[in-house]
Image (tube, rainbow, N blue to C red):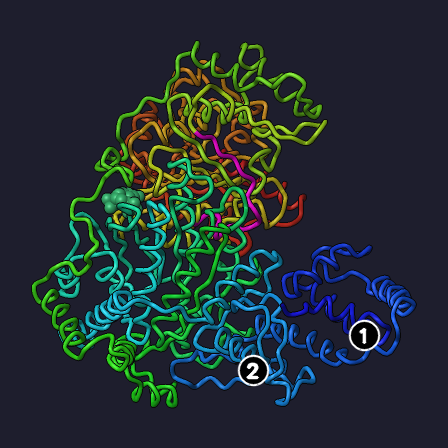
Amino acid sequence: MQESVMQRMWNSAHLSGGNAAYVEELYELYLHDPNAVPEEWRTYFQKLPNDGGNTTDVPHSPIRDHFVLLAKNQRRAQPASAASVSSEHEKKQVQVLRLIQAFRARGHQAAKLDPLGLWQRQVPADLTIQNYGLTDADLDTTFQTGELFIGKEAATLREIVQSLQDTYCRTIGAEFNHITDSEQRKWFAQRLESVRGRPTYSRDAQAHLLERLTAAEGLEKYLGTKYPGTKRFGLEGGESLIPMVDEIIQRSGSYGMKEIVIGMAHRGRLNMLVNTFGKNPRDLFDEFEGKKVEGLSSGDVKYHQGFSSNVTTPGGELHLAMAFNPSHLEIVSPVVEGSVRARQDRRLDPNGDKVLPVSIHGDAAFAGQGVVMETFQMSQIRGFKTGGTIHIVINNQVGFTTSNPLDARSTEYATDVAKMIEAPILHVNGDDPEAVLFVTQLAVDYRMQFKRDVVLDLVCYRRRGHNEADEPSGTQPLMYQQIAKQRTTRELYADALIKAGAQTNEDVQAKIDEYRTALDNGQHVVKSLVKEPNPDLFVDWTPYLGHAWTARHDTRVPLDKLREIAAGLTRIPEGFVVQRQVGKVYEDRQKMTAGAMPINWGYAETLAYATLLHDGHPVRMTGQDVGRGTFSHRHAALHSQKDATTYIPLKNLFEGQPRFDLYDSFLSEEAVLAFEYGYATTTPNALVIWEAQFGDFANGAQVVFDQFISSGETKWGRLCGLTVLLPHGYEGQGPEHSSARLERYLQLCAEHNIQVCVPTTPAQVYHMLRRQVVRPLRKPLIALTPKSLLRHPLAISTLEDLAEGSFQTVIPEVDAVDPAKVERLIMCSGKVYYDLLTKRRNEGRDDTIIVRIEQLYPFPEEDLAEIIAPYKNLKKVIWCQEEPMNQGAWYCSQHHMRRVASAHQKGLFLEYAGREASASPACGYPSMHAEQQEKLLHDAFNI
Ligand code: AMP
């Protein structure tokens, strides 16, 4: 048996002073990756006094001293002459281990990843043997392989280098050395090296790959001939995507996966829908011919459409969902995550064993869009994680017309952002379908084992322009000269298989003909498609379809029941020590239940959640600081002062209760809101809430409001009951955080797409939240919520108000007034109401009533008309708001109020009392704020 490195080193007094430097290098290697050094060295290093485990920051001096001491002892024990015979070899041995490490870390930089062969990259010096003081003369010397997984303990340098080049520098570029966890790094090294980067696939597998490529290419050719010049954002140049996604589905199916949700932009989407999801080609042709989808008022272009189907896999039937996608790149990724998390929650699948997210990106958008980073950030956060996402970058090396990396990014690869969460990145040359298959298998296996994100960078090209009507050679002359010469992926692979005797010309042609015939006949082209899908695999939305916004509902909960529920809500476990003020909040809540105190906002809100849970509806709430509430009104999560454990009463109401999920979110608005949109569009029976810390924080998520929340139903028929709470109110706090930009939401309103409410009492917020779920209608709710009003002595309700009543879209005058005397009607929303009320009471004005519009959209014209009907002598009708004239409800809602006023009494004119138009939402000086506020109140009563 061959002598081990360790033995030889010891025997040759390797640890003598002269060799200490090399051992130190070996030690450094070990610190970087314990698996990079042979087992016996690892064991040895582990026992060293100052072994820092896996940190590279360990000072070396104690180690060096340790070796010097050892060496002294060695010298004493051994004759000096035995030393240097093999010490030269041992030095080289260490360098060989370093070389192996270098290939693992940087081999991808020498890999042939670009199918067009246009990349000009220098092979890093540390991938050459010379870099390590080795020469060609060493090539036939045998070295220990360390933990190079090539099935032998020792090999010649020539074989070691060859195996490294085969593994790391062919058509796969594997980046995994940035992962801190050595088990994961070892996993990749082992999987890649053991097959030298290229497993042998069976003839059946090869035939299947070719069939999939034939389908991918066949569809584009067919559409190109049938609808020349029509935009379809074809996949040509990236056809390997189809076998890649196919493999993800089949392989994860064999792991027992039950659902996969895929998000992708326009490129290749039609191809995927027909060739992977089994969309009937005839339906696609109808779309090319401009046929409208019944029931959608606006609809969307075909390459934004979602789709659902079920396919068979080795592990059983699997449900596939393609998310609807707007043109705004990358924003669908967090929506997919939210949808997946909702499905996992429904299936009680906390580890992500049953539902898999797949996000397909473009290279330019992946590098350019900030929401990519936000989505990665959520990947391991407890409120948002989904057990790992498989990301695919269709890297066609062009972002519309921008292909020069100097203009596209500051990083080497388009995928570098993924390293922020240490995701492994597998680059692969799209013209090598077997390499594509292999990295896909690795990605699925990695995700299933480690439950973390993984990125597949499919390096390909775009055979045509940005779309089929676009001419790319004007901006990318050299690239497109090469593309004109480039044979297709299918042709190249078919030739290779024919050459290897795995396929015949006839086999290849038969695949082409078969596919074309299926398309001619308008047949499904996915063999695994389930014709009668198992409906248990997805949610039934039919109970929520077809309801008018006035749908009947009853949000009451009988008083006794309410008290019983309240008891659970205010119960704190024995021995759980809460902070003093929080304890007071809970004591007050007990008094409120007993009727000894009026109900305040925070309690009414939490009672809404508790009663919904009792009704069987799950509740999910996220946002910045939602547990406590930005303004400390909620205290839904209690923190033990003894041991910092958390107790959430709403989670502990009764045995077998529905989920109550409450998560303080990370500091993102865009991705988090998109996530919650995805969650809500997948969970119709739940109350799903996102709360902005201050209302204007939602500015950072504007795209989600525009592209999804306000228009998802009319574009795609996707219902959504998401609730968004936006703290709003002018309290002299300056331009930021005063305004939730009400006007933006009102401007988005049409066709009863969303609801915009501004509740002003605890009972109103209670009934509004309950209505959102109790009513079968699913419409997004934008609710402007208060700040100072949370503790305003007049903004109170009684338990009876909660037990009885309902959400009032308009609240009539609350004081007893004689209608005959009333000449002035002031309408308003939100906090200003209490200022107006106080002023009127102080001034004893009995000619004025104040009516609150609590739902600004859909505007309750009928309710308002009914409420003002008794006031026959009105001379003045005023809309009063705190916001500047160009903001708030004035411009967007006045036509409704005018209509009601003029119907009430001909010639009745609507007037405005509020701040002057302003570029900024609010002023920054408290004194100016106070003056403005006083003036608008004065105007309301004196115009
Ligand atoms: P999915 O699991 O997302 O593929 O959805 C399965 C089916 O449920 C879809 O084909 C739709 O018919 C229906 N569906 C899903 N989500 C919604 C929604 N937000 N609004 C209306 N119907 C939906």
Residue 629 sits in quarter: top right
Compare residues 712 and 384 and report the one nearer the observer: 384
Q: Which residue is mark 2?
A: 158
Q: Which residue is mark 1?
A: 19
Q: Is 655 drawn above or below residue 53 in the view shown? A: above
Q: Please state the extent of the stretch shown in magenta in the rendering.
A: 659-674
Give, as a three-letter code, the residue at label 2.
Arg
Quadrant of image for the N terminus: bottom right
At a point 62% along the width and 32% down the height, the residue shown is: 632
Q: Quadrant of ligand 1?
A: top left
At a point 40% along the width and 43% down the height, the residue shown is: 679
Residue 660 covered by magenta stretch: yes
At a point 49% along the width and 16% down the height, the residue shown is: 798
Residue 795 covered by magenta stretch: no
Compare residues 290 and 514 and report the one nearer the observer: 514
> Which element type, helix, strand or loop, lies under badge 2?
helix
Label of residue 237 in the image = none
Q: Position of residue 707 (x, y in %)?
A: 36, 54
Q: Position of residue 637 (x, y in %)?
A: 58, 30
Is residue 244 shown to the viewer in this render?
A: yes
Confirm if mark 1 falls within 8 A of ligand 1.
no
Give, as a three-letter code, the residue at label 1.
Asn
Give the CA distance from mark 1 to mark 2: 25 Å
